[in-house]
Amino acid sequence: MWILVLVLGLTAALFSILDVWYFLRAFLAILRARLQPVVKDLLKEHTFSSLVLPHDLDFLLHMNNSRYLREADFARLSFFTRSGLFGAIHSLGAGMVMAACTARYRRSLRLLETFEIRSRLLCWDDKAFYVEQRFVAPKDGFVCAVLLSRQHIIGNSPDKVVQSMCKRKVESPEFPEEVLHWIKYNDTSSQKLRAESGASNNTKDQ
């Protein structure tokens, strides 16, 4: 009996100090991606399906805006695993972190509504990959939300990562206009924040 109480206590403690469901979903997303066929084309769109559950809801009974970012995280894990991007980064002894993200919400997702997250690699520069993710309602194809993120490579460069994957040098696709505007906004924001803190302009953000 006391073993059961101990197990229940440890489980409760674990759930109280860690977001266990996040780690479980992330693990399952990666496992599922590893069991699926490898996507040879790095620029090919990747589809990740999901469902709005009760714990995703906010006071207005639609999916909380923060849940979009969480679901996008799982979709990227799947995308980067299936495309071989994670494998190439790790083989080079490098790492990747989220350096910037913006989301635009167009229509609410409701309880038990299914949706697809369509992720694609848009382009890259000397420091980061730029990824677009669209939340699409399968019933009518409407894009409910769009998320743009900057995935910064630590300890190497995107060019080297892509070269490792493709076994040859590959140039980045042309930067979409909205991405160029977004990069300019981020650069302006960084300069403003450095000026406010008195940091040198040589101090770079990720």
Image (spheres, rainbow, N blue to C red):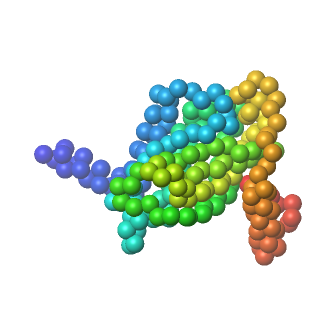
Residue at image coords 53%, 41%:
47
The answer to whether residue 18 is visible is: no
What is the number of callouts on the image? Answer: 0
Q: Of residues 146 and 204, which is closer to you in this image?
A: 146
Residue 126 shown left or right of residue 120 in the figure: right
The answer to whether residue 113 is visible is: yes
Residue 163 shown left or right of residue 55 in the figure: right
Quadrant (top left/top right/bottom left/bottom right) for the N terminus? top left
User: Horizontal and vertical percent for residue 67?
Assistant: 47, 59
Quadrant (top left/top right/bottom left/bottom right) for the C terminus? bottom right
Residue at image coords 18%, 45%:
4
User: Horizontal and vertical percent for residue 116?
Assistant: 49, 47
User: Horizontal and vertical percent for residue 75?
Assistant: 53, 45
Q: Of residues 164 and 185, which is closer to you in this image?
A: 185
Q: In the rendered image, which quarter is residue 202 located in?
A: bottom right
Which residue is at the far front? 140
Which residue is at the far left? 1
Q: In the rendered image, which quarter is residue 179 located in?
A: bottom right
Q: In the rendered image, which quarter is residue 180 located in?
A: bottom right
Residue at image coords 70%, 28%:
165
Residue 97 shown left or right of residue 11 in the figure: right
Which residue is at the far bottom? 196
Q: Of residues 8 and 183, which is closer to you in this image?
A: 183
User: Horizontal and vertical percent for residue 60?
Assistant: 40, 72
Q: Of residues 73 and 62, which is closer to you in this image?
A: 62
